[in-house]
Image: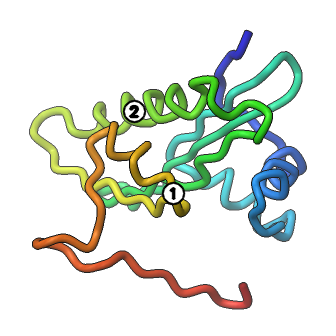
Amino acid sequence: MITYNSEISTESYNAMRLAVGWKLLDSAQAAAGLENSAYLTVAWDNWRPVGMARVVSDGGYMTLIADVMVLPPYQGQGIGTQLLINVNRWLDSLGKGGRMIMVNLMATPGNEKFYEKFGFITRPNDHMGAGMVRWING
């Protein structure tokens, strides 16, 4: 049975990054990123973390969903969906009282349709340009 909490070690986080084909981060840098997350949800299969997602926020209106990943053997079992449900539940709580919240994310190639199920729109479109990124030493 998969359970969810908000804890993951830096080592497990980096191991998960490698397992999904992402770059390994310096452990101090990874730890700082995890500690400074506004919200973190982690899927566990007993003692093993098998998926996670986190939110970075400026504390005002701007948020970014980051590090949505599920270990390959666990993909297709609804874990990613539950992670996004958890994230969206938290984000929706920020919008109470009429507060405006802008939620950004960068989908990995081929996963855009997954995020569209949660109300995200693909860029570029008639109202917004393409999302962009710049890596330093990456």
Q: Is 1 placed left or right of 61 in the picture?
A: right
Residue ID for mark 2 = 90
| Camera-side residue of 97 and 73 | 73
Amino acid at circle 2: Trp
Q: Is residue 24 left or right of residue 138?
A: right
Q: Residue at x 72, y 84 (%)?
A: 138
Classify residue 66 by image quadrant: bottom right
Q: Which residue is mark 1?
A: 110
Label located before the other in sequence (1 or 2): 2
Q: Secondary structure at mark 1?
A: loop
Q: Residue visible at 54% across and 87% down?
A: 134
Q: In front here: 122 or 82?
A: 122
Judged left or right of residue 6, residue 110 is left
Marks 1 and 2, Cα distance to the nearest angstrom? 25 Å
Circle 2: is it few (<14), some (14-19), or many (20+) Cα within 10 Å?
Answer: some
Residue at horizontal 70 percent and vertical 16 percent from the top: 2
Q: Secondary structure at mark 2?
A: helix
Q: What x and y, as percent, mark residue 83?
A: 54, 32
Residue under the image location 42 percent in, 54 percent down: 112
Image x and y of residue 35, in percent:
67, 51
- 109 left or right of 100 in image: right
Three-letter residue code for mark 1: Gly
| Looking at the image, residue 75 lies above or below residue 123 | above
In the rendered image, the quadrant that contains the N terminus is top right
